[in-house]
Image: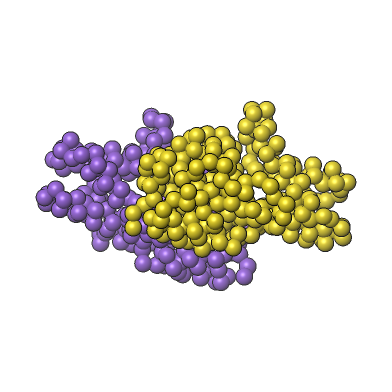
Chain colours: A purple, B yellow
Amino acid sequence: MTAFVSPSTGRQLKAVLFDTFGTVVDWRSGVAAEIRKFGDRHGLALDPFGLADKWRAEYQPSMETVRSGHRSYVPLDQLHLENLKRVLERSGLSPAGFTSEDLGELNRAWERLPAWPDSRDGLHKLKSRYVIGPLSNGNTALLVNMGKNAELPWDVVVGLDLLRVYKPDPAAYLGAASVLRLDPGEVMLVAAHNGDLGAARAAGLATAFVPRPSEHGPGQTTDLVPASGWDAVAADFIQLAQMLTEGAALAH
Amino acid sequence: MTAFVSPSTGRQLKAVLFDTFGTVVDWRSGVAAEIRKFGDRHGLALDPFGLADKWRAEYQPSMETVRSGHRSYVPLDQLHLENLKRVLERSGLSPAGFTSEDLGELNRAWERLPAWPDSRDGLHKLKSRYVIGPLSNGNTALLVNMGKNAELPWDVVVGLDLLRVYKPDPAAYLGAASVLRLDPGEVMLVAAHNGDLGAARAAGLATAFVPRPSEHGPGQTTDLVPASGWDAVAADFIQLAQMLTEGAALAH
């Protein structure tokens, strides 16, 4: 079985790394479910999906404070907790009304996200041929617990806390390849987000797009189609695994 | 199923980390087998076990040049390659007589070490209850390839190259716990080496001793018995898994 050769890098793939939030796991349903439990525990009538969307909306801006150099690196789970408190405050729920254990428990929602239905099977098939792991802004502890809860068969879990950067900083993509002692062109990023793939390609990685059209719920309008000629485009991880392990033709 | 409580740390275990060379995998048989292949490829009559022992004998001295501050951190696979060239030279085989591909291939012997017969089953059982991973002086790429070749079901693989230290530097044990967002007392080191366990305990970790009486061959005289009252002492990983998952009494 020959390895997939990336048309853009000209190299045989050795490792296939994955964006996680939205690409491997369904953060919106998972976080909404945990918010519902939180509301039930505290006798509050909350809007689980609305709050999940508001919490996620704080994600990029909070990482940007680090990427821009306005603040030194802090791990994602700390940003998630700060963002949660901000969202609760804006929703008229004073964070001071909850114990740090309550808030910490809700914050761990990001470690209990359900995998998309095809994720596990596709990862197992890819694992038979490539080194697989996350290439996520999540910190290592978060990703290890997520992987254990969702039974993701990663070969390696190195969170970007170990490199103290956040995607799309080129150092995130280059560092992930370097940790595996591989050339960037031997590493593929799989993501449901064209922006992430663009940054990975600029750093010299191979790229694959797998759309997740309900990541943001029924009304999603972004990342429904590939925005560029990525090395591979697949409907789900199972088709991607077939393309990368059975030498199938490119999807475009 | 309640978690094992470490008598020495008083904490419930969350993660069980393993020394790898000698504890999880049989470096001597594995390296000797690769040296035999190397000799056959080059029509050389070598002493596989003798050379394996000489190569391993360079391990601690080479790391000591880094631990002592005489040289800045370099990953273990680089030290292994330097040590290999030194051993070949001393054996009357000029490294210059081989291509860098030849030597690199032999150096990857450390990524192809066989697991001890009980390792995989014990790790699978422990994985059902704890986060499991290596806590090894190997660098991440080496450990990822070793784990894939030996089918070790690690939840996390963070080599000490990411912390730029070598055991028994306390920063190695403390850093491993920190990466997992755990207190040192919630993490257990499993090792076949009393010295490694002593350093782990000094850093605040829980400890378990599993003897590997043939690690150094038939004449082994070291690390045959526990040198201290470690939290657990087991004959192999299967017994260790029973002790840590079935609330069995301590082995001492």
| In-image side of B230 versus B181 (left or right) | right
Q: Could you say which is closer to the camera, residue A154 or residue A79?
A: A154
Q: Is residue A138 above or below residue A246?
A: above
Q: Residue at x 68, y 32 (%)?
A: B65
- The number of numbered badges drawn on the structure is 0
**Where, quadrant-wise, is the N terminus of chain B in this rendering?**
bottom left
**Is residue A179 something one can see in this rendering?**
no
The x and y percentages for residue A7 are: 58, 60
Nearest the viewer among B97 and B133 is B133
Rendering quarter of residue A174:
top right
* A151 relative to A239, above or below: above
Near-viewer residue (A109 or A218): A109
Residue B246: give x, y in percent of width and height.
39, 58
In the displayed structure, would residue B151 be above or below residue A174? below
Please report the residue visible at 41 percent of the width from the left and 56 percent of the height from the top.
B248
Give the image location of residue B110, x and y in percent.
Answer: 67, 52
At horizontal 41% and vertical 31% (from top left) the residue drawn is: A72
Residue A64: give x, y in percent of width and height: 37, 37
User: Is residue B236 at all visible to an observer of this figure?
Assistant: yes
Q: Residue at x 57, y 64 (%)?
A: A129
